Image: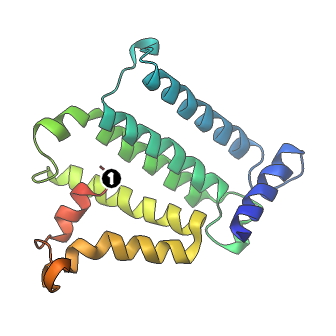
Amino acid sequence: MSQELELENTLRESASGQKGRVSGVAYWSVIALGTIGLLMGINQTFTLRLMGFDPMGNSFLYYLIGIFLAASFLISPATASAKKYVPWYDWLFGVIAIGCTIYLGMHGLKIIEQGWDYSAPLEATLVSAALLLLVIEGIRRSGGTPLLIVVVIFGAYPLFAGYLPGFLWVQKVSSGSRCKWSPT
């Protein structure tokens, strides 16, 4: 609950012109990312094909993940010391998130047709692993440690579920395979 208040106060400070974390270029970047995400959602929902943009379902979701994950890095600080400014690594994380999701979005059809859930090229697996780590960091920042713990436990469940008894057992999965299915 306190993180919601902090986020609300941060956005309120920025909107009122007070110096806060999301001000200046960061503020306009968040506004631009949110606008792009909103327009993409409208375009996809109503099949408008604005500017010829008509991504497949999985590609569309990758693009949205990248846009809003990048915005979350600009809004939510990694540490308490970064509450008044956006450090360089948050910009870097945002760019990497957008880059990873553009790569996956551009290969959306191949992901489906070639079954990348089971046998993806190495570069796609590495991109997925990077995106997975960024998503986990975004969850830690936005949702706090309790949500992070829940996500890590359920996200890692397939890795150790092959050793569990009875109804908890599932087929054993490698960590590389886990990275391949995570964002989809």
**Number of residues whose C-alpha sits closer than 10 Å to that of mark 1, classed few (under 14), some (14–19) or many (20 or more):** some
Find residue 70 and report its horizontal and vertical position in percent.
Answer: 53, 48
Residue at image position (74%, 65%) is 83
Residue 7 occupies quadrant: bottom right
Find residue 136 and report its horizontal and vertical position in percent.
Answer: 44, 65
Question: Residue 164 versus residue 166: which sits nearer the camera?
Answer: 166
Residue at image position (65%, 64%) is 77
Residue indicated by mark 1: 183
Is 89 placed left or right of 84 in the picture?
left
Residue 130 occupies quadrant: bottom left
| Amino acid identity at mark 1 | Pro
- In the displayed structure, 61 sits above or below 94; it is above
Is 182 placed left or right of 146 in the picture?
left
Please state, as top left, top right, bottom left or bottom right, where the N terminus lies in the image: bottom right
Residue at image position (33%, 69%) is 155
By what rule are the colours in the image chosen?
Answer: rainbow
Q: Residue furthest front?
A: 167
Is 83 placed left or right of 136 in the picture?
right
Question: Residue 32 versus residue 87: which sits nearer the camera?
Answer: 32
Find residue 116 and report its horizontal and vertical position in percent.
Answer: 15, 47
Identify the element where label 1 is drawn.
Answer: loop
Numbered marks: total: 1
Question: Residue 130 versus residue 38: which sits nearer the camera?
Answer: 38
Residue at image position (25%, 36%) is 108
- In the displayed structure, 47 sits above or below 60; it is above
Residue 165 occupies quadrant: bottom left
- In the displayed structure, 65 sits above or below 53; it is below
